[in-house]
Structures are given as structure tokens and as C-alpha cells.
Image: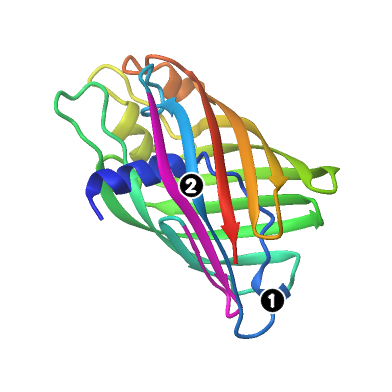
């Protein structure tokens, strides 16, 4: 697996639709729940960049009944026996984005440890949060992700999922991406986002999905002189097979 392939897979991960997947507490012992498919997406090369990239990559997820799961380049464990509450550690292969103001700067990789919590207020309404370390351009920095998603059936085989949230980062993370000699991006709100996914169940095994997401950098990173565009949009379409 080449570094370029990993780069594209990580870049596309944010475009894959968040799913109300079957969790360990709902699965028969010794079973697993697997989705594999392909995803096409177009959006900014990096956050704050005007340059657009289009790519097609595989996307996949596996959930085992013992609580272990794999979602793209992120693995973790669900330590909860409560079907409405999920939490545990994660370990991901993270992409450190290149800095726009450093000639020859390129993406690099890191192994980022973290923790997550998800809580289902209802069967179709979910709150989520995670905390990860190491995603900064210099290999340091904490990022907290807060989100909420709502799933609404449209027909017996179609559903609409709407999600929103915000990301917060410490000073080390902000400085590594947005600070310059004359500008210091302080810790705090990094960005906010809003998106929607349309899912179509083609059969018992196949489904199609399409989606759009909008993001906006907050003032602290958004006012950095290296940011070309504070607003970003990503459009995606894909298909998956369940077994």
C-alpha cells in the first residue's frame, strides 16, 4: 500500500457518510458486520485551500461482536455493553496536511491515539465526541471533535441523514498549521461543519449514498495569512456491499 494511496484514503474518509452501524451490544456473539465499497469525492486539497481535488478510493468498515472495530484507517474498541452509549480508545493512521506557505511541504503520517464517546438520544439521533493527539503538522497537538447526527427515513428503502458539529484544537495544533512569523493562531474553535447524506438501499446487500458537506474555519485559524478560503465544500457519491 503506497503512501499516495493512504493519503487519498485519509482525505476521502471525511466524505464517507456517518452510519448508524450495528454495534457490538446488538450483535450475536462471534459475528461481525462488514461494509466494503468505493467512494468518489471532490473537495479542497487541504483545509483553507482553493485547490480542488477529485478522487476515487475504497471505503470500508468492520464491527466485531467483541467490540473491536475498523473504520478506514482508524481502529478502536467499544467498551460499553449499553446499546445507547459507546466509548473506548482508538488508534488511527493520521494524515498531517502540508503547510501552504512552506515550499516543498508535503503530507506526512502519524499514528494518533485517542478516545471517543457516542450517545444515542433516540434510535435516529446521535451525539458524538472524540479527542485525538498527534495530528499537528509537527506531530503534536490535541483536537476535540463534537458532533450530532439525525437520520430520517424517506421511504422504505431511502433515508436522509443530517449532521453538524465543531472541531476544537489546542495551541500546538493551531500553530503547526496556521501560525506564521507575524501571526499566532490561538487555541480554541477550529471549524464548524454541516452536511447531509442520502442513502438508497438497492438490495439486501447493496446500497448507494451521496452527500454534501460544508465547513467554515473559525476566526483564529481563518484569519491566518496562509488561508486562501475560509469556506469549503465537499461532494461525494459511493456504493457499498454489506456482508
Q: Which residue is at 65% across, 49% downward?
A: 207
Label 1 Cα neighbours within 10 Å, binned few <14 / some 14-19 / many ≥20:
some
Disc 2 element: strand
Q: Nearer the viewer, residue 146 or 219?
A: 146
Q: Position of residue 144 (x, y in %)?
A: 51, 46
Q: Kindly tell me whether residue 86 is visible in this rendering.
A: yes
Q: Which residues are magenta?
A: 53-71
Q: Which residue is at 75% across, 65% downward?
A: 84
Q: Which residue is at 62% across, 48% downward?
A: 18
| Position of 139 relative to 82 (above/below) | above
Q: Indicate which disc residue 243 carries.
A: none
On-image quarter of the N terminus: bottom left
Q: Position of residue 157 (x, y in %)?
A: 79, 48
Tell me the distance, in whole angstroms, between the alpha carbons under discs 2 and 1: 25 Å
Which residue bears the numbered disc 2? 38
Question: With 119 as the anchor, is 77 left or right in this view?
Answer: left
| Coloring basis for residues | rainbow
Q: Position of residue 103 (x, y in %)?
A: 15, 23
Amino acid at each position: 500500500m503506497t503512501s499516495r494511496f493512504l493519503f487519498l484514503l485519509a482525505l476521502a474518509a471525511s466524505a464517507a457518510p456517518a452510519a448508524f452501524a450495528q454495534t457490538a451490544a446488538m450483535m450475536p456473539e462471534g459475528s461481525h458486520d462488514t461494509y466494503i465499497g468505493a467512494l468518489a469525492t471532490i473537495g479542497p486539497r487541504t483545509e483553507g485551500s482553493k485547490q480542488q481535488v477529485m478522487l476515487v478510493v475504497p471505503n470500508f468498515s468492520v464491527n466485531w461482536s467483541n467490540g473491536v472495530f475498523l473504520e478506514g484507517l482508524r481502529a478502536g474498541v467499544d467498551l460499553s455493553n449499553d446499546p445507547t452509549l459507546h466509548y473506548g480508545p482508538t488508534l488511527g493512521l493520521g494524515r498531517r496536511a502540508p503547510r501552504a506557505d512552506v515550499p516543498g511541504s508535503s503530507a506526512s503520517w502519524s499514528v494518533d491515539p485517542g478516545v471517543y464517546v457516542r450517545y444515542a438520544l433516540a434510535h435516529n439521533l446521535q451525539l458524538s465526541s472524540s479527542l485525538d493527539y498527534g495530528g499537528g503538522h509537527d506531530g503534536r497537538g490535541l483536537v476535540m471533535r463534537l458532533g450530532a447526527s439525525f437520520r430520517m427515513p424517506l421511504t422504505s428503502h431511502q433515508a436522509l441523514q443530517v449532521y453538524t458539529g465543531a472541531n476544537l484544537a489546542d495551541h500546538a495544533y493551531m500553530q503547526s498549521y496556521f501560525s506564521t512569523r507575524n501571526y499566532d493562531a490561538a487555541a480554541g474553535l477550529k471549524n464548524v461543519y454541516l452536511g447531509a447524506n442520502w442513502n438508497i438501499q438497492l438490495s439486501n446487500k447493496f446500497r448507494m449514498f451521496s452527500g454534501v458537506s460544508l465547513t467554515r474555519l473559525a476566526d483564529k485559524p481563518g484569519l491566518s495569512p496562509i488561508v486562501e478560503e475560509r469556506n469549503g465544500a465537499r461532494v461525494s457519491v459511493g456504493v457499498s456491499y454489506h456482508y
